[in-house]
Every structure is written in C-alpha cells, then in structure tokens.
Image (tube, rainbow, N blue to C red):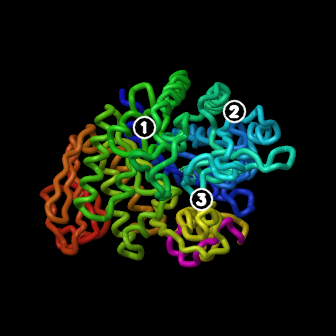
Amino acid sequence: MAEWWADAVFYQVYPRSFRDSNGDGVGDLDGVTAGLGYLDDLGVDALWLNPVMVSPMVDHGYDVADPRDVDPLFGGLDALDRLLAAAHARGIRVTMDLVPNHTSSAHPWFVQALAHPHRRDRYIFRDGRGPHGDQPPNNWVSVFGGPAWTRITEPDGTPGQWYLHLFDAGQPDLNWNHPDVFDDLEKTLRFWLDRGVDGFRIDVAHGMAKPPELPDMAITDTALLRNSEDDPRFDNDSVHDIHRFIRTVLDDYPETVAVGEVWVHGNERFARYLRPDELHLGFNFRLVQADFDAGEVHDAIDNAMAAAELAGATPTWTLSNHDVEREVTRYGGGARGVARARAMALVMLALPGAVFVYNGEELGLPNVDLPDEVLQDPVWERSGHTERGRDGCRVPMPWSGDTPPFGFSSAADTWLPMPAEWASLTVQRQQAEPASTLTFYRRAIQLRSNRTEFGGSGVALKTVDDRLTLRRDGGLLCVLNTGTDPVPLPPGEVLLSSGPLTDGLLPADTAAWLV
Ligand code: GLC
C-alpha cells in the first residue's frame, strides 16, 4: 500500500498567523486546535506547523533556544498535546518544523560557548583574519544580508573570535562534526515522535554540513536560499550522513515522514536527498519560480517530475509558503492575480504526489504592503532596509466580521496589522459564497481525494501556444489557459473550473478539470 503522504494535501500553518486563542495578538496552538473543524472541512490530510519551540523569536521560531519544549507564546507543551489529540481524532496528521542547521544564540550551548572558549566546538568559531583578527574568517554572506560572521567580546572584555551564522546573528550555525550535535538531534526527534508527532519538515536541509577549510565563496548573490552551483555554504556531501542519521530514527516510528527544504542547483543534486535511506520528500520550488505562462509551468512540472523520478521518490508541489510573495500578488494582483492563482491551484492539485497549501492561500489572500515601522523580518534590518523581507506573506488570517482583526484575535493589535479590505476575504464570507476561492479549494481537494481519475503516478503534458494540457494515468485532464483569448476544451465532462466558462470555452487565466 502507498504511504499516506504519497498523495497527501499538507496544510502549512504559520502559527503566529492562523488563529489567536488568548488575545495577545499572536496566533497559537490552541488557535490551531480551534480551527481544526475548518481544516477538516477543507479536506487536508496533514498539517505542517512552522517552528513552535522555545525561541526568542528573532526569526519567529527559526531561532530555537530549547528544541524540546513549546514556547509559552504558542501555549506550551500542553497546547501541542491538545492539538495532537484533537487532530488525530479527526484523522489529520501533524508534522513539525525541525531546525537542525542552527540554534538560537540564547541556546544554553551558545551561552556556554561565549563564556568558555573551550566549549565552542559545537558551533563554528574561528579567529578573524588580519593582524588584529578584526576581519571575518572568510567572505561568506548571510542569507539575510550582511556578513555571515559576528565577532564576539571575550569574557575578559577584549575583542574576540568570530562565529558563523548563515542567517541572523541570533542563529549561530551548529558544528555537525561534533557528536553532541547528533546525539542531541536524536533526543529531539524521539521527544516529538514519542509524543505522537507524525514527522518533520526539515529546515535548510541542504545546509548543516560545512567544508572543513571554510573556503571563500565566489558568489555574492544573497538572494534568499537561491543556491548557485559553487556555493560552499550549502549542499556539501557530508550533509547526507546527517539525513541518513535522521532517517534511521524515523524508521523506528512507522508512518512518519521527513520532508526537507532543499534548495540546490540542479536535479541530480536534489535527487541525492531523496535516496531510499534519506528524506522521504523534498520540497520542489519550481512552481513557485515559474511565471504564469503555459510553457514555464510545463517546464516546471516536467523538471520536478524528472527530479523525483531520478530518486524514485514522490514529487511535491507548492505555490507558496512563509518565505515567498503570495501567488495572487506574484501573478499580478487584483482580480487577475486571484483568477490566475485559482487556475494554478487546479494545476497543482491535479498533479501526482504531495501538495502543500500555505495558510490563507485557500482564501486567495494577496501579499500585504506593510509600512516600514511594523516590519519584523530580520531581513529588513540586515539588508540595511533594502529588502523588505517576508512579513507581507505572513499577515494573520481573516476569519469573520467586517473590521480587523476579523476574528483572528480578540486584541485589536495583531502582531502584523491586517488590511481593512480583507473584509471580503474572511472565512465567514467565503463559506457562504458558492463562487468564493474557499469554496473552490474545498471542492477541488474533495474531488482530488475521492475521484479515481486522479489515480496513478504518471502525468503527460502537452503545450500548444498558451494552452497546457495535463493528463493523469487515471484519466483526469487539466487544461490551463495562460493566453489572452478563450480556448476550446477537449471533449469530456467538466468536473470543476477555476472560473466560469464562456460558451463552453476556457477563458484566459482559467483552468478546468475534465474526465
Ligand atoms: C528556512 C525557513 C525560513 C528561515 C530560515 C532560517 O529557509 O523557511 O523561514 O528564516 O530557514 O531558519
């Protein structure tokens, strides 16, 4: 029998932004539990929770100070247990983010390392270059902008060594050559798996291992996680030992899954992460990178299928997440952006493999242009205010009512402000409208999980001009029109379309499913 995740719809919950149960303006785990009925109706199979471990929240949880406890902001461990029990009672699995590349600078190991030079070997400390050691040990840049090294002050008050952080200075990189790092990760994995967690999304799965000599990098492109071929910061071969190690632990827990965030150059490198003794799934970001263009979407799908095939693995699909601009905005915004996002949702949900829907995508939420003074992403500061960062795709979900905070919270002050015009996008409004994006998503997910035409692992693609046609082994046809004029549909019964058909034709910016 196929694994449960092989055709699952995962719903990504950004816990700060899903639903706030205690009125502090920040979403939490009891909020997720309260929203389970909604998620059940949407038809999702599993959740992926962005990090909820104890954290100073410099990078909203991707800076973990205690990997085996839930932050009080999210309700503590008991709230997670409540969520696990309630989700499992509904048959919804729960996967968590795991952050093995780095810890928070508030992690006890790092605090110890600062105070005791001989305890620095679990991180990557080096002396600086130059006669006074005041130049960073190499030229690596942080993914968030600026140098990837920060100089510390030694306990005696003198300027001291430097430590590596590929992200924020509050996120020191771990030294994966140290056995403690492996032992501790095993403890962490078992801690959550023993509590009933169904698997992990592995953050920066292409990171962790560093070349021992830490050579300078040739490139200076700091674009978020877009790796180039000769970037010594990422995708070093010994990372695979770490993935094999993680897999041996997961193999002790049947039906658990590891999905890696893998940004690497080319399919050959990608496929290595999906070997039978490594990750079960790897995020493929080709659809995120493709423009709304039949040829580009065709190539993205071909490429992602080929990457998965190389490893004999299950393909994965995603249109957005907490790190990228929302697709409604990427595709041009406004009514057109929504129409295109819905069309692309039909394409994504027509594909074989695991699908990841990012909270709010099912409501057709756009990115939000936030004023400077509310920005929180460390990217904003680290880039010297040249990159606005990722807050615009992390604005809380609108649930009900006509004014912010739209039932997200009882506090008027939400951690990011919610736009007044979202009154028309609330769950409550959309639930009542047959033509809403939410109703459309529900219908699409329901058909995907119930109809036999979605069976089989293959898909045949054909693009003629601006029309992409996709045929599943089970018989489903999906047609996407990225041109400007309506196009004819092939013969068959239309199961669902992303917008109204006109005289039996498929309008621009629209997709349809046929059997
Ligand atoms: C991943 C996460 C991102 C985070 C970074 C550092 O790319 O998706 O949100 O900032 O890792 O942990």
Indicate which disc, 2 or 1, sits on the residue closer to the N terminus. Answer: 2
Q: Residue at x 44, y 62 (%)?
A: 438
Tell me where the magenta segment starts and ends, as one range. Answer: 413-426
Mark 2 or 1, closer to the camera: 2
Quadrant of the image containing the N terminus:
top left
Residue under label 1, please give it.
Answer: 281
Amino acid carrying mark 3 in the image: Gly
Helix, strand or loop at mark 2? loop
Residue at 36 percent of width and 44 percent of height: 449
Question: In the rendered structure, does residue 15 fall within the stretch colored magenta?
Answer: no
* Dot 2 amino acid type: Asp
Q: Which label is found at residue 146? A: 3
Q: Nearer the viewer, mark 3 or mark 1?
A: 3
Q: Secondary structure at mark 1?
A: strand
Marking on residue 135? none
* Residue 127 screen position, x and y as percent: 68, 42
- N-term-proximal mark, 3 vs 2: 2
Q: Nearer the viewer, residue 116 or 423?
A: 116
Q: Residue at x 62, y 27 (%)?
A: 182
Q: Is residue 29 visible?
A: no
Q: How many marks?
A: 3
Cβ atoms under marks 3 and 2 closer than 8 Å: no
Q: Which residue is mark 2?
A: 121
Alpha-carbon span between mark 2 and mark 1 = 31 Å
Decide which of 254, 227 is in the foreground and name it.
227
- Say whether residue 336 is left or right of residue 246: left
Q: Amino acid at mark 1?
A: Leu
Judge by depth and name the residue closer to the eye, 265 or 257: 265
**For the residue carrying disc 3, how many other residues have a C-alpha within 10 Å: few (<14), some (14-19), or many (20+)?**
some
Q: Is residue 377 left or right of residue 501?
A: right
Give residue 38's position: percent from left, percent from top. 54, 54
Neighbours of disc 2 within 10 Å: few (<14), some (14-19), many (20+):
some
